[in-house]
Amino acid sequence: MKRSLCAAAALAIGLLGASALERALARPIAPAERRASPLIGDVASCADPSVLQSIEERFKIREDNYWSSGLQLLGFDHIRQMGYRTDGYDYVPRRYCQARAAFNDDKYRQVVYWVGESLGFAGYGFGVEWCVEGLDRNYADGPDCRAVRP
């Protein structure tokens, strides 16, 4: 009995000490706008033509060069924002989006994507990561495109 009380007390002290240590080592949260190389939160909209064109072009390259499917993305509708900076204000500003896309096999599929600030070539422009539900054949973005969702 005495031994189990001592073990429980030691465990409690260890857990309390670990959480105090975690708090002491935690980095302070500083909004991306206050960094040495600040980000301003200027992220293209979900319906920005250059964002949608980037997805179309990269989809075509992937399907032609890697899968040889002949599948083409024809256009987008039902475009909506799912979140903005949902990762926190100290991370790179991102806008999370979803759209319905029409394909040349007469099917519509959901496309989820995010647009990030200053993630283009050499930090210029924007970066786009996207996933077409049902066409992530090697699960590069996880089940149901989880890696691209907020």
Image (spheres, helix red, strand yellow):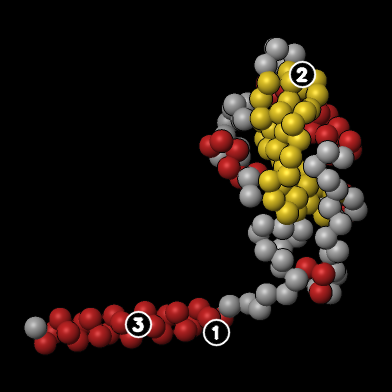
**For the residue labelled by badge 1, is the local secondary structure a helix, a strand or a loop?**
helix
Residue 37 found in image quarter: bottom right
Name the residue tied to disc 2. Answer: 72
What's the residue type where badge 2 is placed? Gln
Residue 41 vs 13, above or below: the answer is: above
Residue 147 vs residue 33: left or right?
A: left
The structure residue drawn at horizontal position 75% and vertical position 50%, both measured from the top left corner, is 95
Q: Marks 1 and 3: in contact by CB < 8 Å?
A: no
Measured from the top left, where is residue 49 in percent x and y?
89, 36
Query: Dot 1 corresponds to which residue?
Result: 24
Amino acid identity at mark 3: Gly
Q: How many discs appear?
A: 3
Q: Decide if residue 65 is in sight here.
A: no
Q: Secondary structure at mark 2?
A: loop
Asked where in the image residue 36 lies, by quadrant, the reply is: bottom right
- Disc 3 is placed on an element classified as helix
Quarter of image, res 133: top right
| Quarter containing the N terminus | bottom left
Q: Residues within 10 Å of mark 3 (few under 14, many from 20)?
A: few
Type of amino acid at the residue the image marks with label 1:
Ala
Residue where numbered disc 3 is placed: 14
